[in-house]
C-alpha cells in the first residue's frame, strides 16, 4: 500500500497554504503564502511541523466524557460529568461579581460558580437550557458546586463521547479543541507503516498504528492507571520504538567515528609518561592505573578516541588527564585542556604546571581575561607548537587560536559545554590530513558527576566510559548535617570553633545580590553579616561577576590560609582544592540540584581533618527538596547520588547541551524502563547490521535532525 504524501505543515486541510505556482509563472505572479494564524505559529513552536510529529504528540492525561453521573451520586472531591436543566442564572455582587448557575436533575441541584465570565456564557446558561458540565465537585455552604466547569448546551439526544477525551500539552495560543482536530488529522495522514521486521520487533508488541490510535482515543473500559503510569502495552511499544531510535543514532555515531582518522600516539617506555609517574608526590590508585591503561590503548589506535572519564569528587581525574597529555606530547603532538570556568581552569593549570614544567614542558594559559602582549605571546607559542599543553576556558576554541599539531583534546565538566563548543575544539586539527583523509584529535571528556548505569547505556552509549571507582587514601568521610534557617547562629558558633583551631570554612549562597522575586539569603549580605559576627577574622567574598584578577587574589588568600571564611556563590563548585577547609555551609540547600550539592560537599574532606557539610534550609520544603536533602543525609556515594538525581529530576542534568534543548527521550523513563533499554540495544545492532536502510528510516521518523547532537 503506497504511503500518503508528505505534508510540509501538519494542519487542518482548510488551513493549508495553496499549491505552489508552476515554475513557468512569472515572478510577479508568485503569490505570497497567507500569514500564519496564532495557533499555527504555536504549533510550530511546539515542534508540530510534520504529520508524524502530531501523531507522536501524546496526551498528558484524559477526561472521561463517556458517562453521566447523576447529581444525586456526586460526592465532594469527585471529578465527574453531570447533566441537567438550568433552573436559575444570575450575577451576584459580593466581594466580586460572580455568575451563579443552578442546574437541576430530577430534583437534585448542582451549583456552578464562575468568577470570570462573558455575556455569551451567561446567554448559553439561560434558564431552561439543558447543559452538560464537567469539573471537580466541591462541598459548598449551599450544597455541591463546581467552580469554572467545562460546559456545553445539549439536548436529551446529544450522544456521549465514545472514547476518553485526550488533554494534550499545549500553550496559551493553542486551544485544546484546535489541537485535538489537528492531531486527529495528522494521525490519519501520517505514514505509520510498520518499519521494523519480525527479527527485530520483540514478540507480542502492538503495531505502531494500533498503539498510537489507542493512546489518542482509548476506550473508557481501559484502566486509567495503566494509561497514566505508561504501563499499557501501547505505551510499551512507543517507548521501545523511541529507545530503539536513540540506540540506533548512538550506534551510527560510534560507527561513523570508527571511519575517521586520528594521530597514533604511541606510548614509549621510559617516555614522558613514565618520567611523570616517577616525579609525582603520590602513587596512583588501582582505579587510576586501570583507566590510564584504557586511555593509553585508545590513543595508540588510528581512530579518534571518544572516551568519558567519570569519577566521584576527589577521585583523581586530573592526574589521569595529565598522564594522557604526557603520551600525546611525548609523541610530538599538542594537548588542549578546556574547563568551563576560569577558576577551574586555573586550578588545573597550577597542578599541571607543577607536574609537567619540571619535565621541560611549556604550558600556555588562555582565558578571556588574558589580553594584550601576554595573549599574543601565548597565541604564538600555540601556533608554533612551542606550547605543548594549552589550558584555558572557552578562549581555547576562538578563531585566533591556531594549533600546530593538536593530538588530544581534554574537556573537563563536559556537560557544561554546548555541542558547537565541543565540535569547535575537535575541528582545530581539521587542516591536517593523513593519507588524504582529515585528522581528528582524540577526545577525553571528564565529569565529576557519575552517570547512572541506565543513562550510560542510553544517552552516552556512543562513548567509551572509564570509571574511577576508588578514592585516594587519606580522604576523610564528610559528615552531613541538616539545620533549619532559624538555627543560623548555632552554625556561626561552629564556624568560630573551626577558625579558632586554624581551620577554614566555605559558606555558599545561591545569589549574588538581593532579588525582588526570590527571598534568599544573598552572598553580599551574608559576607557582611559574617564580618560583623567574626571580628578579627578575615572573611572573603567570591562570585562570578568579580574581575578575574580580584577572584584570583581572593582564592590565593584563601589557599594561603589568610582568609578563614570564604563566602561564595557556586563558582567554587568544582576544582577548588584546599585541604585545610573542614566546614562547608550551603545556604538554601533545598534550592540546589542534588548533583550540585554533592559537588559542593566535595570541597571539604580533602585533608586528614574530619569535615562537616551543613545544609541550611527554609521551610516549608517541597517534596523534591525533601528528597534531595534526604539523599544527601543518607549517602556520600556519588553513584548513588547520581541514581537518585536521575529519579528526582530526570536525565537533563547529566546531559548538558548534548540535547541542546531537544529531548531525545520523551516517553521512556530511564529509572523504570531498563528492561526495554536492553531490548532496544540488542535490536539496534540487528537492525543496523541486517536492515541499514530501515534503520535510517526509523531514526528519521523519531528523531529527525536531533540525532546530530550526538556527534559531539
Image: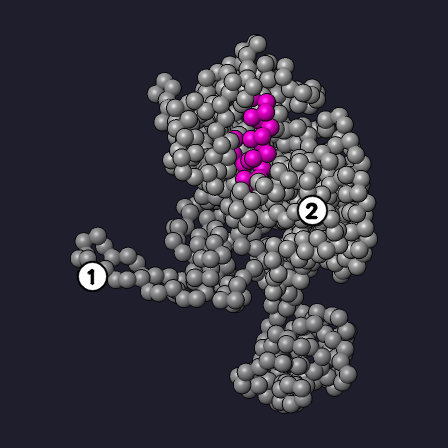
- As drawn, the residue found furthest toward the top would be 269
Q: Which residues are magenta?
A: 337-356
Q: Say which residue appears at 39% left-offset and 24% top-offset.
A: 384
Residue located 46% across and 17% down the image: 332
Which callout, 2 or 1, points at the residue further toward the start of the chain? 1
Q: Give whichever of 35, 627 is nearer the camera.
A: 627
| Residue 341 at x, y percent in the picture | 55, 41
**563 relative to 694 in the view: left or right:** right
Observer-nearest residue: 494 or 574? Answer: 494
Secondary structure under the numbered disc 1 in the rendered image: helix
Q: Which residue is mark 2?
A: 538
Relative vertical location of residue 1 with respect to residue 46 in this rendering, above or below? above
Mark carried by residue 29: 1
Binning the other alpha carbons within 10 Å of mark 2 as few (below 14), some (14 to 19) or many (20 upward) gives some
Is 299 situated above or below 52? above
Q: Is residue 637 above or below residue 162?
A: above
| 597 displayed left or right of 681 | right
Report the quarter where the N terminus lies.
top left
Residue at image point 61% right, 74% down: 150
Magenta region includes residue 540? no
Residue 373 drawn at (x, y percent): 40, 35
Res 579 visible: yes
Asked if one can make out residue 442 in the rendered structure from this viewpoint, the answer is no
Residue 680 or 246: which is nearer the viewer? 246
Q: Position of residue 5 (x, y in %)?
A: 38, 50
Amino acid at each position: 500500500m503506497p504511503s500518503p504524501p508528505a505534508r510540509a505543515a501538519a494542519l487542518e486541510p482548510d488551513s493549508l497554504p495553496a499549491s505552489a505556482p508552476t515554475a513557468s509563472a512569472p515572478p510577479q505572479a508568485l503569490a505570497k503564502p497567507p500569514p500564519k494564524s496564532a495557533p499555527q505559529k504555536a504549533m510550530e513552536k511546539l515542534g508540530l511541523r510534520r504529520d508524524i510529529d502530531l501523531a507522536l504528540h501524546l496526551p498528558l492525561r484524559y477526561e472521561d466524557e463517556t458517562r453521566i453521573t447523576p447529581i444525586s451520586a456526586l460526592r465532594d472531591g469527585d471529578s465527574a460529568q453531570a447533566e441537567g436543566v438550568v433552573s436559575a442564572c444570575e450575577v451576584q455582587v459580593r466581594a466580586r461579581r460572580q455568575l451563579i448557575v443552578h442546574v437541576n436533575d430530577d430534583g437534585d441541584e448542582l451549583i456552578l460558580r464562575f468568577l470570570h465570565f462573558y455575556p455569551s456564557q451567561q446567554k448559553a446558561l439561560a434558564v431552561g437550557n439543558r447543559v452538560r458540565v464537567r469539573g471537580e465537585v466541591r462541598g459548598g455552604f449551599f450544597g455541591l458546586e463546581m467552580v469554572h466547569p467545562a460546559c456545553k448546551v445539549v439536548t436529551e439526544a446529544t450522544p456521549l463521547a465514545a472514547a476518553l477525551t485526550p488533554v494534550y500539552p499545549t500553550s496559551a495560543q493553542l486551544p485544546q479543541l484546535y489541537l485535538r482536530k489537528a492531531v486527529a488529522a495528522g494521525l490519519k495522514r501520517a505514514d505509520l507503516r510498520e518499519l521494523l521486521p519480525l527479527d527485530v520487533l520483540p514478540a507480542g508488541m502492538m503495531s505502531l498504528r494500533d498503539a498510537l490510535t489507542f493512546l489518542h482515543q482509548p476506550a473508557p473500559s481501559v484502566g486509567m492507571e495503566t494509561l497514566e503510569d505508561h504501563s499499557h502495552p501501547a505505551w510499551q511499544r512507543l517507548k521501545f520504538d523511541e529507545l530503539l531510535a536513540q540506540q540506533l543514532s548512538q550506534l551510527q555515531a560510534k560507527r561513523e567515528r570508527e571511519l575517521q582518522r586520528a594521530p597514533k600516539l604511541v606510548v614509549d617506555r621510559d617516555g614522558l609518561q613514565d618520567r611523570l609517574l616517577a616525579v609525582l608526590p603520590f602513587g596512583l590508585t588501582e582505579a587510576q592505573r586501570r583507566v590510564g591503561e584504557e586511555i593509553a590503548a585508545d590513543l595508540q589506535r588510528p581512530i579518534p578516541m571518544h572516551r568519558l572519564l567519570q569519577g566521584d569528587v576527589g577521585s583523581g581525574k586530573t592526574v589521569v588527564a595529565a598522564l594522557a597529555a604526557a603520551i600525546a606530547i611525548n609523541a610530538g603532538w599538542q594537548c588542549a585542556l578546556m574547563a568551563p570556568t576560569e577558576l577551574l581552569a586555573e586550578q588545573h593549570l597550577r597542578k599541571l604546571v607543577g607536574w609537567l614544567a619540571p619535565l621541560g614542558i611549556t604550558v600556555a594559559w588562555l582565558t578571556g581575561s588574558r589580553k594584550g602582549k601576554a595573549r599574543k605571546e601565548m597565541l604564538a607559542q600555540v601556533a608554533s607548537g612551542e606550547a605543548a599543553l594549552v589550558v584555558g576556558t572557552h578562549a581555547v576554541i576562538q578563531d585566533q587560536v591556531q594549533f600546530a599539531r593538536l593530538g588530544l583534546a581534554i574537556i573537563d565538566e563536559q556537560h557544561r559545554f554546548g555541542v558547537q563548543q565541543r565540535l569547535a575544539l575537535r575541528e582545530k586539527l581539521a587542516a591536517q590530513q593523513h593519507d588524504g583523509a582529515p585528522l581528528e584529535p582524540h577526545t577525553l571528556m571528564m565529569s565529576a558527576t557519575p552517570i547512572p548505569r541506565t543513562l550510560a547505556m542510553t544517552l552516552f552509549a556512543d562513548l567509551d566510559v572509564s570509571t574511577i571507582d576508588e578514592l585516594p587514601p587519606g580522604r576523610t568521610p564528610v559528615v552531613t548535617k541538616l539545620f533549619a534557617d532559624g538555627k543560623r547562629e548555632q552554625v556561626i558558633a561552629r564556624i568560630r570553633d573551626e577558625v579558632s583551631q586554624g581551620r577554614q570554612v566555605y559558606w555558599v549562597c545561591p545569589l549574588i545580590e538581593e532579588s525582588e522575586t526570590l527571598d534568599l539569603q544573598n552572598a553580599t549580605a551574608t559576607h557582611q553579616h559574617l564580618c560583623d559576627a567574626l571580628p578579627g577574622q578575615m572573611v572573603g567574598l567570591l562570585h562570578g561577576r568579580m574581575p578575574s584578577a580580584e577572584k584570583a587574589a581572593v582564592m590565593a588568600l584563601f589557599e594561603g590560609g589568610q582568609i578563614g571564611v570564604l563566602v561564595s556563590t557556586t563558582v567554587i563548585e568544582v576544582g577548588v582544592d584546599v585541604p585545610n577547609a573542614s566546614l562547608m555551609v550551603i545556604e538554601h540547600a533545598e534550592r540546589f540540584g542534588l548533583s550540585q550539592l554533592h559537588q559542593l560537599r566535595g570541597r571539604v574532606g580533602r585533608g586528614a581533618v574530619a569535615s562537616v557539610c551543613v545544609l541550611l534550609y527554609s521551610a516549608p520544603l517541597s517534596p523534591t527538596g525533601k528528597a534531595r536533602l534526604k539523599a544527601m543525609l543518607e549517602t556520600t556515594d556519588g553513584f548513588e547520588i547520581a541514581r537518585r538525581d536521575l529519579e528526582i529530576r530526570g536525565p537533563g542534568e547529566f546531559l548538558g547541551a548534548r540535547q541542546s534543548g531537544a529531548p531525545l527521550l520523551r516517553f521512556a523513563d530511564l529509572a523504570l524502563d531498563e528492561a526495554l533499554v536492553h531490548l532496544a540495544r540488542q535490536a539496534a545492532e540487528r537492525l543496523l547490521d541486517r536492515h541499514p536502510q530501515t534503520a535510517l528510516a526509523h531514526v528519521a521518523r523519531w528523531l529527525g535532525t536531533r540525532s546530530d547532537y550526538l556527534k559531539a
